[in-house]
Amino acid sequence: MALFAIGDLHLSLSTEKPMDVFGGEWIDYVDKIKAGFQRMESDDVCVLCGDISWGMSLEDSLADFQFIDNLPGKKIILKGNHDYWWNTATKIKNFFDANNITSIDILHNNCFFYNDTAICGTRGWMSDDECSLEQNKKISDREAIRLQASLQTAKDAGETICFFHYPPRFRNTICYDIISLMNEYNVKKCYYGHLHGDGHRFATQGLVDGIEYGMVSADFLNFVPYRIME
């Protein structure tokens, strides 16, 4: 049994947005994802850090969820900025149940346990130039509230690991509310995705101010889930 993470699968099995058009690492990326997950066993757990499917609705994303469901191990998903299919947790769970998708759980205002390690997280946020300062603050505050709700459910954990879609730190952008909550709840490790291409060069990696950061964007990992712990 082992814990893994990977982000940004960007599946498009029933929509017209395949990532192969970007070339490079993305060529044949669906086959690479399938091959990469073969390192996992049936009792392993993998956190998918957002940007899972290009589908605009749950129905549009069904083929992508079925693909993920057929990969080895249990998967825990959180929302990315391109997950337009995202809905309430109840609607997502009901959709999964109706379509016999059994290996995917939803990380949203809650937590999961891997042995005595709590798996917490939320989408997170990076300031968007197209949003006003007021809009950026509103979204950031909402994500902090969601992270706190997740962390509060993990208060009895031996260790807590946070997972995000957006990086809490990227170049000169620092999400102080998110980092403050991680410090308050004694989180020592966090993993995130979102960054592609040249963004990989500027990713925060390793120990910074007491928290170990790791980027798990699929193209950065060559589509092989990153092993966090046994």
Image (tube, rainbow, N blue to C red):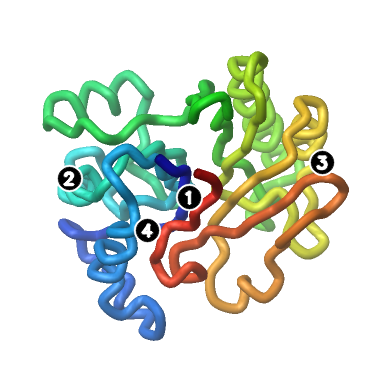
User: In the orientation shown, which residue stands out farthest toward the bottom?
Assistant: 24
User: In the orientation shown, which residue stands out farthest toward the left?
Assistant: 99
Q: What is the CA distance from the residue labelled 3 to the residue labelled 4?
A: 27 Å
- With 59 as the anchor, is 32 left or right in this view? right
Mark 2 or mark 4, which has the lower sequence index?
A: 4
Residue 182 occupies which quadrant of the picture? Answer: top right
Mark 3 or mark 4, which has the lower sequence index?
A: 4
- Amino acid under label 3? Tyr
Report which residue position mark 3 lands on.
176
Above or below residue 195? Residue 5 is above
Q: Nearer the viewer, mark 2 or mark 3?
A: 2
Q: Nearer the viewer, mark 1 or mark 3?
A: 1
- Amino acid under label 1? Ala
Above or below residue 97? Residue 29 is below
Place of residue 89 in the rendered image (x, y in percent of width and height, measured from the top left): 37, 23
Report which residue position mark 1 lands on.
5
Above or below residue 207? Residue 62 is above
Question: Crowding near pointer 4: few (<14 within 10 Å), some, many (20+)?
Answer: many
User: Do labels 2 and 3 touch, CB within 8 Å?
Assistant: no
Place of residue 70 in the rendered image (x, y in percent of width and height, measured from the top left): 18, 47
Task: Please name the residue shown 27% across and 42% down the image.
Answer: 42
